[in-house]
Structure formats: structure tokens, C-alpha cells
Amino acid sequence: GAVVSQHPSWVICKSGTSVKIECRSLDFQATTMFWYRQFPKQSLMLMATSNEGSKATYEQGVEKDKFLINHASLTLSTLTVTSAHPEDSSFYICSARVIAAGGSYEQYFGPGTRLTVT
Amino acid sequence: QKEVEQNSGPLSVPEGAIASLNCTYSDRGSQSFFWYRQYSGKSPELIMFIYSNGDKEDGRFTAQLNKASQYVSLLIRDSQPSDSATYLCAVLTSYDKVIFGPGTSLSVIP
């Protein structure tokens, strides 16, 4: 399957600071990437859909001014958590969509970034 | 009604048995369905995807899809302790978003 990387894999930051998370598709070009958040013992919740060269589409309840998404190239999307607070502590996972032969979709996930805000 | 529903479990099966995981979805226009496995603290790993009604087999895994009933399942044959994980059902909805179910925790007892 396709490989998606994320950096950093974990980060601890102080309340009020900003953190940037990078998501890269390593062996394919991804026109669409997705950002998910997962709290302990819960499922993945879609935060936003990121299309290369255009503004991200945010899910209801996700503050776009707090979670800045940039998809500057076909292999890189970034999520910046601005003015982080302890309640933002979570596992952030990006995913890239691959359109396979025949037009079917496959979606591959990065390894995730565990953010802890103190 | 939640968009994708799964039994939360935990589901316990003895080693070597068949584990059956179920998922229902609400968007009748959904066309693509995925099963992911997630170990604690790790990111989800794609196991199988299915688009057509019927069964799709890959090794010890069989996915079953019934669009009329809006139901998709995953069977794991000859379950191994290493299969112990949370299994997430995901659905590509008609509005082009992949939505995840809450996951079913599977425990395979040696």
C-alpha cells in the first residue's frame, strides 16, 4: 500500500504555543488529504478535508482559525494547532486518498502525532 | 442515528475460532467500505476494502457487503492472539467523506 508519513510522532508543548504537524505522501501524489483527531478510547473524528491548492473544508464544530491547514503541494499537508490548550491534547492522524485503477478510492493513514499540551 | 455503527465489544474468541465483526451505515448512497485494524496507540491499518455486494476474501479475512441491508461485516478465520485489536469500519459516503464507526475491540484468547 501507499506510504504516508507524519512528523513529529509526538510533541509536548506549553499552553498558548502553536504546533505544526506535517503529513507527507512518500510514494504517490495525494490531491486530497484528511485530518482526523482521536481521543482515548474513541474513534477517529474527521476534522477537515484538505485539497491541494485550495482552502481546507472543516467539519462542523472544528475551529478553522485554531486548526490551520495548508496543502501547498501534492505530497505535503500541514496542520498547525494555534494557541494550544490542554483540551487540544489528542492523537492527530492524517490520511491521504489514492484513486486506484477504475476510479475506486483507497485511503491510507499516517502513523499519527500524539500532542500533549501542558 | 449515527452514520456508522458497530458493536463496541469487547468481543472475545478463542484462538483458532472465527471472529465476526459487524457494521451498519445510514447513508444509502455509500459505495465504498473499509475495514481498518488499530492497535493501541497506533494509527489505523487498512485490512480490506469492498465495493460490490457479496463476499471478498483475502487470506484469513473475508469482507461481506449487503447494500440493501446497509450492512458490512468482517470475518477473521483461524483467529490469532496477534489479531487482538480494535477494528474500525469506515464508509465512503455519498458526500465524499470517509466516516468511521466507533470500533469493535477484539480479544483472541490463547
Image (spheres, rainbow, N blue to C red):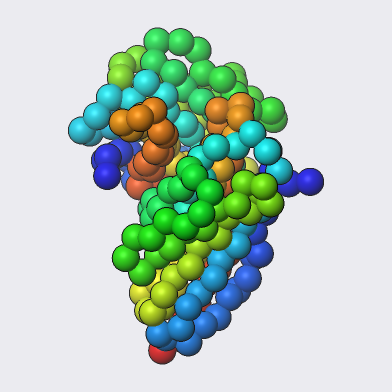
Q: Relative to residue A58, is residue A22 drawn left or right?
A: left
The vertical placement of A66 against B3, above or below, is above
Q: Relative to residue A49, is residue B1 drawn left or right?
A: right
The vertical placement of A68 against B59, above or below, is above
* Most foreground residue, A73 or B78: B78
* Most foreground residue, A8 or A45: A45
Q: Position of residue B49 (x, y in %)?
A: 43, 48
The vertical placement of A55 against A12, above or below, is above
Q: Residue at x 60, y 52 (%)?
A: B66
Q: Relative to residue A105, is residue B7 drawn left or right?
A: right
Q: Where is residue B89 in the image (x, y as percent from the top left)?
A: 54, 53
Q: Relative to residue B16, is residue A90 drawn left or right?
A: right
Q: Position of residue A75 (x, y in %)?
A: 28, 24
In the displayed orientation, state which residue is furthest to the left: A27
* Most foreground residue, A53 or B77: B77
* Most foreground residue, B2 or B55: B55
Residue B34 shows in this picture: yes
Residue A20 shows in this picture: no
Q: Residue at x 48, y 33 (%)?
A: A35
Number of numbered discs visible in the structure rendering: 0
Pick the quarter of the image with the N terminus of chain A.
Answer: top left
Asked where in the image residue A29 lies, by quadrant, the reply is: top left
Q: Where is residue A43 in the image (x, y as percent from the top left)?
A: 58, 51
Q: Residue at x 52, y 82 (%)?
A: B13
Q: Which residue is drawn at 50% across and 21% down?
A: A68
